[in-house]
Amino acid sequence: MDTGRQGPSERRLFLLSMLAGVGALLGAIAVWPLYRYLAPQGGGGTTEQVAIPLSDVPLGAARFFDYHGRPAVLVQVQAGEYVALSAVCTHLGCIVKWVGEKRHFLCPCHGGQFAPTGAVLAGPPPQPLASYRVIVQSGKLLVG
Amino acid sequence: MDRLKTLMDWFDVRLGVREILRSNLQGYLLPRHVNIWYSLGAVLLALFTLQFLSGILLLVYYLPAADKAFVSVERIMNAVPYGWLIRTLHMVGSNIIVAVLLLHLLSVLFMGAYKKPRELTWLSGFGLFNLSLILCLTGYLLPWSQLSFWATTVATDAAGAVPWIGEGLVTFLRGSPSVGAGTLGRFFALHVVAFPLLFLGLVGFHLFCVRRAGISVPPFGPSARPAGVGTTFQHEVHRDGIPFFPNYTVKELAVVMFVLAGLVAITVFAPALFLPPDALEPADPFTTPDHIKPEWYFLWAYQTLKIFPSKLMGLAAQGGAMTLLALLPFLDRGEERRPFHRPLFLTLYGLGILLLLGLSIWGHRS
Amino acid sequence: MKRGVLASLTLLLATVMPLTAAYAESTSASGEAAAAETVCLQCHGGQAGRLGAPVSPWRQSIHAKNGISCHDCHGGDPADFAQAMSPERGFLDVPAAAAIADFCGRCHVGVREDYLASAHGRARERGPHCVTCHGSHTVQAATLELINAKDCSRCHEFGRAGQIKEAVAAVDARILAVERDIAAMHRIGFATRELQDELFNLRNAFHRLFHTVDVNKVRKETEDFSRQLDFLDGKIAALHAELQWRQLVGSGVILLLLAAGVLLLLLRKTYADEERGRKEE
């Protein structure tokens, strides 16, 4: 390289482009640990079934639980008939309440109502509550 | 490019940003022969930025409770991806900062840059130096290791030597009769909020002083003369100087890069350099570890206290030395800044460094 | 102005004092501190002859290092001068020869079991007891050196003992090596408690083994210990690999930072050339 002959401004352009390359590389190396450090760990992404003891869900009562990091609810609608739903209202994300005597879910935020099947009965929610598969196995309810 | 210009125009019309940039970057001229020591301020700015960032990141996983702190740090070091990197950088960074602070302080002293009209720059800088040491001390407790616990016990205990109010002062500093959960709470608040805010304000003032008074000319070379400061404010301009940006900033950035390389080198190759074995054991209020020693930058203070027959005298000696240093520009008022025209100062300077080194080595060995 | 200076002085003193005063005194208490206070040591420490003799060897022992004091073996009340050696407070005197294994075996349960089942244990009316090889108050961390021709041949030929020593030597050396590795990893900030616990269990089980003094059993089971050690070695190797990865990427970053520094210095030179040019004009 014969940079000595070139004027300062030509050398500068070359050096600056080199510097930009080195800087970009350093930046990339710095961003990766930062992302990994802040990235959520565990919780989401698991596909394991969640087990709830049968005795926790008597007839007509609801049991709230954590399903892969999100609130969910189990209800025994009729004897031996269990329903598992997402407890997150599809309107603005509040957690629905189980109104035992009326046999429906009520969202305390804007009065949305859901049937035990998850279907919207009244109010602003645009979609039904997501439902999960439930199986009974050796004294436990397996959700998922 | 055009869009950038439009954006600049928008701001320029409202705030006159081009004027600000011109007068502080290209139009801000530094003395032609500023030396490498002038870049230490920029190095410190970069290192402190790194401390702020890594500190904020550590807060994501750190838990400031006596029964959780050690485990949370252990988790950061082992379970959180790249937590070891953030934590080690923060820890090694604090040590490098103290080293660079000392160099900055010594070079300013050597070049007589603290003299009129830069007394306020010196005072705010000296305040920053002390605040940094206090940040080190308060940060030390947070991992709640044996080292944290006992270093804080001994450090706060020293306040007990203050006449009359000593005992009350110790309890107040600790938030309880002995170091415990209460101490962790207040040290945490001080370390992550109170002192950093104070620090930011003081840095702002320090930089304002530097910019407002103008950079001092290095007192070397045949053209160096005593400053001859008048009685009215005068910004020191250097008409034939070099632009701060980009001519000088590239040099500052180069030094920053070399220091960062050193920081990374220690972080990956010698992570235990500033991590004594006691820092790896959880705090146990009923067992004082053997041979507990302060960090290297407190060794001189530790040894001073051992030399004097009473704790109060030791404290007074240290306080006296620090106060003398803080008030130096008000005591040393001659205009001469060339080191070799100030034999008395130079002798004291040399002896002072030797004393500091000697005490530290003595403290380390004893 | 003067008052301002004075105020700043006071402020400075207030901030600097507690800070520079850091670490006023180094307290040199240790794990022994709690033990030192027992009345046992206060009394016996000053006694001459047989009654004072155990104190100083104990201070050098592995028991003292781990905070096991007189009363932990001999019972009694370590806080009460009058009742310290009262049988009602559980004081036990020097055990009879046949009772030594039970005396030590209250803590060293596994070793006791294997020892009692061994030829040594069955012959204990006249045979070797715990203290025959390990000493009593002087007890040190057990090493392979305890099996040696001089001591073993006090009672029998060294032959079989030598064979056992040979059989366990390799595993013993590996245990020591793994211990060092774990300590090195701990030193640089890795959490190694789990590894330490695993090794602790392994070593205990291994120490039990050669108290059976059964050459065939020892030979057979050392293989099993080897496999367990392989497992620990694997975990340590993973930590080493992690460390090497950090250093590799770290080296790359260091080189990049140095390159950036050099490029910036070269860039500085282009400006310096211009500055010189401008001055010459």
Image (cartoon, coloured by chain):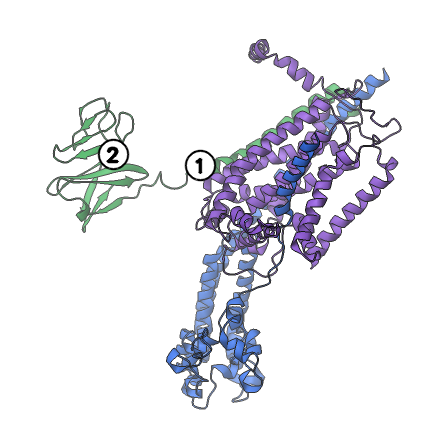
Taking the image as shown, residue B300 lies to the left or right of residue B135, namely right
The x and y percentages for residue A73 are 23, 38
Q: What residue type is labelled 2?
A: Ala
User: Residue farthest to the bottom?
Assistant: C126
Q: In this view, does A28 lie above or below A139?
A: above
Report the residue at 71% width, 17% height from top. Answer: B27
The x and y percentages for residue A31 are 53, 33
Between the residue at mark 1 and the residue at mark 2, the CA separation in whole angstroms equals 25 Å
Image quadrant assignment for residue C93: bottom left
Chain letter corresponding to the colour green: A
Q: Are marks 1 and 2 on the same chain?
A: yes
The x and y percentages for residue A47 are 31, 41
Give SS at disc 2. loop
- Shade representing chain B: purple
Q: In this view, does C117 lie above or below B252?
A: below
Q: Residues within 10 Å of mark 1 (few under 14, many from 20)?
A: few
Give SS at disc 1. loop
Image quadrant assignment for residue A27: top right
The x and y percentages for residue A28 are 55, 32
Q: Which amino acid does label 1 sit on?
A: Ala
- Shade representing chain C: blue
Residue C251 visible? The answer is no
Q: Which label sits on residue A87?
A: 2
Q: Mark 1 lies on which chain?
A: A
Which residue corresponds to mark 1? A39
Q: Residues within 10 Å of mark 2 (few under 14, many from 20)?
A: many
Report the residue at 73% width, 40% height from top. Answer: B325
Task: State the quadrant of the C terminus of chain C.
Answer: top right
User: Residue farthest to the left?
Assistant: A79
